[in-house]
Image (cartoon, rainbow, N blue to C red):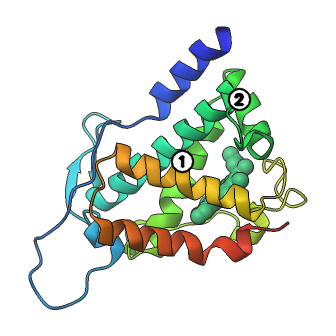
Amino acid sequence: MKNVSKLAFMALFIASGSFFTSCSDDDTAAPQSLYEKLGGTRMVADPNNPGQMIEQGRLSYRSVVDSTITLIVSDIVVGAEGNLGQHFAPVISEALSGNTTNVAILSDNLTDFFSANTGGGATNTYDGLNMVAAHDPARNPRMGKKANNAEYDKFIGYVGAAAGLNGVTDQAIINEVVAVLESLRAPIVQE
Ligand code: HEM
């Protein structure tokens, strides 16, 4: 029970109440990047930081990232079959002992990573580990165990569910997000 209430706190801490919005400001023929399709550089109020503004594209990614983390943690805590507990064990045990700082850093890094790689421009730069190093326990002790293909599938499923929780229903956008995830399978799956 104690762990469950900590989980609830953590979910509250990382969950964001915002929703994806589509951007139709630009009617010119230039193809939109995925970042633009998810709201682009339009500034909106940041629901997690009262008084601050955030680009809608970045907010969209952060919302899905945070929901993904919440889904992974929830599955691990209830012990659902095929959960990613062994991979995230270092992160989860730290968070359950009350330290959520690194979960917040992970959320930020993942948001930077997706934003910077899908057209987020100069306002979103990723300076974390490359994908091979980040997912190799020998180089990143926060990765509890190497991931295999089935676990990667499971991860994509969590992202898909998280997108749905944040109001993403446009199948073309979902397909594009899945294509980005698939393009990263080779460096991340290491067993
Ligand atoms: C599209 C798929 C994925 C992307 C884009 C991604 C991206 C990232 C990024 C950017 C980081 C942070 C690296 C840093 O702090 O320098 C990270 C860390 C991590 N990833 Fe992934 N990842 C993906 C899939 C997975 C999968 C499938 C697993 C496990 C099954 C996994 C487990 C982890 C763990 C345990 C960490 C360390 C977390 C921490 O330091 O708090 N990732 N990933």
Which of the two residues, 95 or 147, is positioned nearer the viewer here? 147
Tell me the residue that label 2 is attached to.
79
Q: Is residue 179 left or right of residue 139?
A: left
Badge 1: residue crowd in 10 Å (few <14, some 14–19, many ≥20): many
Q: Work out how far the residue at label 1 is from the one at label 2, CA to CA, in angstroms.
A: 23 Å
Q: Could you tell me residue 119's position as x and y percent?
A: 38, 76
The image shows residue 10, relative to residue 163, as above or below, that is above
Measuring 45% from the left and 48% from the top, which residue is drawn there? 161
Q: Is residue 143 left or right of residue 38?
A: right
SS label for mark 1 = helix
SS label for mark 2 = loop
Q: Quadrant of residue 45?
A: top left
Q: Quadrant of residue 137?
A: bottom right
**Residue type, label 1:** Ser
Measuring 37% from the left and 37% from the top, which residue is drawn there? 16
Which of the two residues, 82 or 181, is positioned nearer the viewer here? 82
Instruction: Of the two numbered discs 1 and 2 on the same chain, state the one appearing first in sequence.
Output: 2
Locate the C terminus and report the quarter of the image it occupies: bottom right
Which of the two residues, 157 or 128, is positioned nearer the viewer here? 157
Q: Are marks 1 and 2 in contact (CB under 8 Å)?
A: no
Measuring 71% from the left and 55% from the top, which residue is drawn there? 151
The image shows residue 128, relative to residue 183, as above or below, that is above
Q: Looking at the image, is mark 1 or mark 2 nearer the viewer?
A: 2
Residue 130 visible in the displayed image: no
Q: Is residue 88 left or right of residue 17?
A: right
Tell me the residue that label 1 is attached to.
107
Q: Could you tell me residue 59's position as x and y percent?
A: 34, 52
